[in-house]
Amino acid sequence: MIEISRTIPMNDGSQPPLTVDDVWAGLVEKAENPLPYVAAITACTVVDRFEGGLIRDIEHKGPVREVVTFYPKRLVHFVRTHGAARGTIDNEIAVDDDGQDILRFSFRLVVDGLDDGSPEESAFGEQMQSDYLDAVRSTLDAVRERIAAPRTVAPS
């Protein structure tokens, strides 16, 4: 099993600073349409919605089904039910020991055909970690771009 957890500060000096509401909106948007955020995901179809979440089919190194549950302004929890890598992925808004807002991502996955603790499993985990760090950073960047863009008012 691959188990990895990493944190990134929500505000690292980049402008504009982000609020929990800003980041939450970005996480929901990424769950509904990950293509602009996760380069390794090449397709996404939301196949069902339920109160508090959705079910989506994605292409990420093969077909994957995920059940996504939203815990507002705190956690987006993904359960990979079908595909070569099954398990859970969490995107969590939290506060570190210094009182700073952080975004933590964690995953716990079992990958078909890879022996537990093998070099192949380790390589898969490293690649996935890299993909998800990029996704978290691109999500924060996209949120900054969205809130920094001047809002236009439609003529009345």
Image: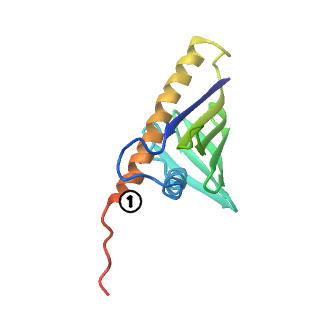
In the image, residue 17 sits, relative to residue 149, either above or below, namely above
Q: Quadrant of residue 94?
A: top right
Left or right of residue 42: residue 113: right
How far from the left and from the top, in percent, is residue 96?
Answer: 58, 39
Find the residue positioned furthest to the bottom: 156
Residue at 54 percent of width and 42 percent of height: 103
How far from the left and from the top, in percent, is residue 152?
Answer: 31, 72
> In what element is the residue under mark 1?
helix
Its colouring scheme is rainbow
Residue at 63 percent of width and 44 percent of height: 65
Residue at 30 percent of width and 65 percent of height: 150
Residue 99 or 5: which is nearer the viewer?
99
How far from the left and from the top, in percent, is residue 60?
Answer: 52, 37
Left or right of residue 117: residue 143: left
Residue at 56 percent of width and 15 percent of height: 120
Q: Quadrant of residue 155?
A: bottom left
Please indicate, yes or no, whether residue 35 appears anywhere in the rendered image. yes
Residue 65 or 126: which is nearer the viewer?
126
How far from the left and from the top, in percent, is residue 99?
Answer: 57, 43
In the image, residue 121 sits, relative to residue 54, either above or below, namely above
Find the residue positioned furthest to the top: 119
In the image, residue 106 sits, relative to residue 114, either above or below, namely below
Find the residue positioned furthest to the front: 98
Q: Quadrant of the C terminus?
A: bottom left
Left or right of residue 19: residue 95: right
Q: Which residue is mark 1?
A: 147
- The type of residue carrying mark 1 is Ile
Q: Residues within 10 Å of mark 1 (few under 14, many from 20)?
A: some
